[in-house]
Image: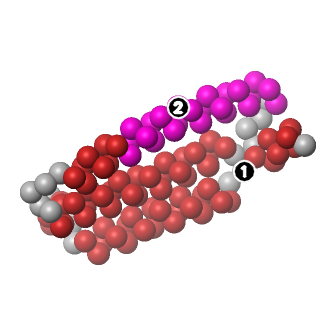
């Protein structure tokens, strides 16, 4: 199934995913939506690893191992970020970026 998808179409989709994540991270005010944007960027990178591995080295699985490593890092990052968000919400009753900046001053 992966062999039937041209690489240029995959690059277009993953580039769009990555830049949608960058746009969401830079424009959103809510910390949870910023976390979702980071996860979207990581998923775009994972797709690139898998498709380039399948395209360049069809018999090997290095891209898949890189993807598993990134998924593990993303899961740990999400767990730490959600713990920070819960702590912020308990202290200031908000998870908006502006409210966190006001708390610092």
Residue at image point 25% right, 64% down: 52
Mark nearer the viewer, 1 or 2: 2
Q: Which mark is residue 29?
A: 1
Distance between the Cα atoms at labels 1 and 2?
Answer: 20 Å
Q: Which quadrant would the C terminus be assigned to in this image?
A: top right
Q: Mark 2 sits on what residue?
A: 79
Disc 1 crowd rating (10 Å Cα; few below 14, some 14-19, many 20+) is: some
Residue at image point 34% right, 70% down: 11
Residue at image point 17% right, 51% down: 61
Residue at image point 39% right, 38% down: 72
**Disc 1 element:** loop
Left or right? Give the position of 101 relative to 21: right
Q: Residue furthest left?
A: 59
Read off the magenta span. Answer: 70-92
Disc 2 crowd rating (10 Å Cα; few below 14, some 14-19, many 20+) is: few
**Disc 2 element:** helix
Q: Residue furthest top?
A: 90
Left or right? Give the position of 90 relative to 57: right
Q: Is residue 56 shown above or below 90?
A: below
Front position in the image: 69 or 24: 69
Choose top left, top right, bottom left or bottom right for residue 12: bottom left
In primary-sequence order, the first of circles 1 and 2 is: 1
Left or right? Give the position of 87 relative to 36: right
Q: Is residue 87 shown above or below 59?
A: above
Choose top left, top right, bottom left or bottom right for residue 6: bottom left
Q: Which quadrant would the N terminus be assigned to in this image?
A: bottom left
């Amino acid at each position: 199934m992966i062999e039937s998808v041209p690489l240029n179409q995959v690059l277009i989709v993953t580039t769009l995913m990555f830049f949608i994540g960058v746009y969401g991270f830079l424009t959103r005010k809510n910390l949870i939506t910023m976390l979702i944007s980071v996860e979207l960027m990581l998923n775009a990178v994972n797709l690139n690893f898998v498709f380039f591995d399948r395209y360049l080295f069809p018999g090997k699985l290095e891209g898949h191992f890189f993807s598993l490593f990134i998924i593990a890092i993303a899961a740990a990052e999400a767990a730490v970020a959600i713990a920070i968000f819960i702590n912020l919400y308990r202290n200031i009753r908000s998870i908006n970026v502006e409210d966190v900046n006001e708390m610092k001053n």
